[in-house]
Amino acid sequence: PPPPTPIWTTPQEQNSHLQGIPPQMSVKKKKLLFIRHGEAYHNSLYAAGNKHNALQVRDPVLTDAGHQQVLSLRKNVNEMVKDGLDIDIILVSPLTRTLQTAYGAFYDQPLRMEACSLVTELCDAKCNEGTAKSKLQHFWYFVDFTTIPEYWWPEHESRYELMDRVAMFKKWLKYRPEETIAIVSHGGFLYALL
């Protein structure tokens, strides 16, 4: 496939999606549930001291340990819902490990799931490069991919560009109509966000 084109190139382009928001539009208070994906194959390689190979695995899947973490998370999610947490939508990074985590964690909940490239990991290594939207849609047919382009991941993203993306996400999130949102993302993105 052709190399992905950068999604965020200039500050004007980064904020172009906000230009149509009327100034009188109300900003609703949000409840946010942040979730980092379960252990993925590259995480296990990195933990075993094989950093070079870990960084070369493109769009890795969850390990068996990662799937076990997701099962535990599902129990926690079900308990929170039982206790009154009413989630309106799940925003999920389009990387495979986050899609697997979101699907497993919210399996028992009939919730809308939307792919959101803004919450993907810092794209500074092969392991953080994604899969084309058309391939993802074929397998993850129940996820809404309408807002992301075919090649949605930034190429050779710097930490400064990540911080710009985090700022853009905060602005975009503020105007979402939903009040309670689960966000399934990555350690690097969440560290930059929080």
Image: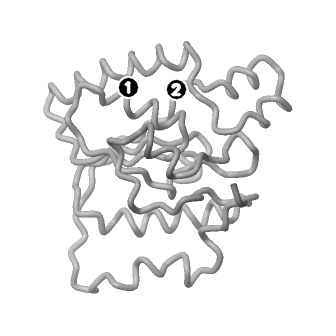
Q: Nearer the viewer, residue 143 or 158?
A: 143
Which residue in the structure is indicated by mark 1?
104
Give the CA separation, mark 1 to mark 2.
Answer: 10 Å
Residue 114: x and y in percent read: 36, 50
Which one is nearer the viewer's eye here, 35 or 140? 140
Q: Is residue 148 left or right of residue 87?
A: right
| Residue 161 percent location from the top left of the image | 67, 65
Mark whose residue sits in front, 1 or 2: 1
The residue sitting at 71% across, 60% down in the picture is 2
Identify the residue position indicated by label 2 in the image.
38
Q: Say what secondary structure mark 1 lies in.
A: helix
Residue 56 placement (x, y as % from top left)? 79, 36
Q: Residue at x 24, y 25 (%)?
A: 108
User: What amino acid does circle 2 point to?
Assistant: Gly
Q: Is residue 70 above or below residue 118?
A: above
Task: Identify which amino acid the numbered label 1 is placed on.
Answer: Gly
Instruction: State the SS at label 2.
Output: loop
Q: In the picture, residue 18 is in which quadrant?
A: bottom left
Q: Is residue 85 left or right of residue 189?
A: left
